[in-house]
Image: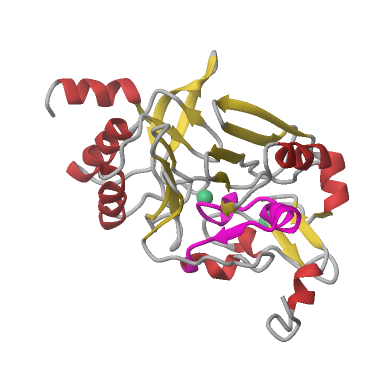
Amino acid sequence: MSPGYLPFAGALRLPAFVCDNCGYWQRHFAAPPSCPMCLDARHVVPQHGWQFWTRDEAQARFPCHWAELEPGVWRFWNEPVSGIGPSAYLIQTPKGNMGFEGCPVFSEAALRHIADLGGMQVLAASHPHAYGALWQLQDRFDPELALHPGDLEWSGALQVSWPFDNILEPLPGLSLHLTAGHFAGHTVLHDRARRILFCGDALKFELDPADARRALTISAHKAFVRGIPLTPGELRRYRDVFAALDFVQTWTPFEQAANSGRAEALALIDAMLQTRPHAAPVPLDSLRERRAAGV
Ligand SMILES: [Zn+2]
Ligand SMILES: [Zn+2]
């Protein structure tokens, strides 16, 4: 693009720094004075002061791994890692690859692996807690970046190219749906063919220690680390989005639950709407018993 069209593009070539406490990246001319994500009421401030890492430091500290969890659906993650450690996903379709969410840092080997898979034509994320190092993917593969403008204030390290309103289908069979709630621009991704909902932080699971793909509990929250519930109106909006989508698996940035789909999500929400919203984990078995009993 011509300099006249993007006169300030140089700002996007500033170095990036990641917050050790939460994993949020900022582009800045020096280590940033603070981290806005940690200062946000949904998160917590580090108890022993700010610590930021450069890309090279983060790559050295946080090894990057990847695995194909379902045919054509790849997970990238860092381990060990500080911060909240979300996963990145790459979804292959006949019309191109889509990235959703970002892990804290991608290694050079991980980026080469993505290139070998065909690169990335579209990129999106549910909300800022799961942005991770999206900026590395944008710099390397120059995909369309689809983010909801409700969270634009958090996207300073990025260049949003494809803002959308309530729904966007950036590749056939992959659709983004605004849920709001957890964040104003919180968005979920539905993979119609594979019947997977990438739900961001709309839902949260506790996993079976013996089977990382099997969830034992499900919950929903405005702020997980603070235990803040959603409002009834926010839950009803989640419900409207989920009810219209067919899914049998639900993947957060942290868990890839193969045994919990739309029925379980709606049962959780309906149970809360009958009483009052809370942020506590609910055993999936108890929701199924309620359904069986017609509650
Ligand atoms: Zn932070
Ligand atoms: Zn979150």
Q: Residue at x 75, y 36 (%)?
A: 113
Judge whether residue 281 can be spotted in this image. no
Label count reads: 0
Q: Nearer the viewer, residue 210 or 95?
A: 95
146 left or right of 287 in image: right
Give, as a single range, the part of the protein colored magenta: 124-149
Name the quadrant of the N terminus.
Answer: bottom right
Q: Is residue 14 above or below residue 62?
A: below
Q: Is residue 69 left or right of residue 165?
A: right
* In the rendered image, the vertical position of residue 186 relative to residue 273, given as above or below: below
> Farthest top residue?
210
* x and y percentages locating residue 51 in the rendered image: 80, 55
Residue at coordinates 75% horizontally, 50% vertically from top-left? 20
Q: Which of the two residues, 165 or 128, is positioned nearer the viewer here?
A: 165
Color scheme of the displayed model? secondary structure
Classify 60 as above or below 140: above
Relative height, residue 4 to residue 122 (above, below):
below
The outermost residue toward the left is 294
Q: Residue furthest front?
A: 94
Q: Is residue 146 magenta?
A: yes
x then y, percent, for residue 247:
35, 34
The C terminus - image quarter: top left
Quadrant in the rendering for residue 114: top right
- Which residue occupies the foreground of this view, 204 or 51? 204
> From this viewpoint, is residue 124 visible?
yes
Where in the figure is residue 228, as x and y percent of width and height? Answer: 42, 50
Residue 258 sits in quarter: top left
Instruction: Locate residue 180, reporting x and y percent.
Output: 39, 58
For residue 76, which quarter of the picture? top right
Name the residue: 62% across, 60% down: 37
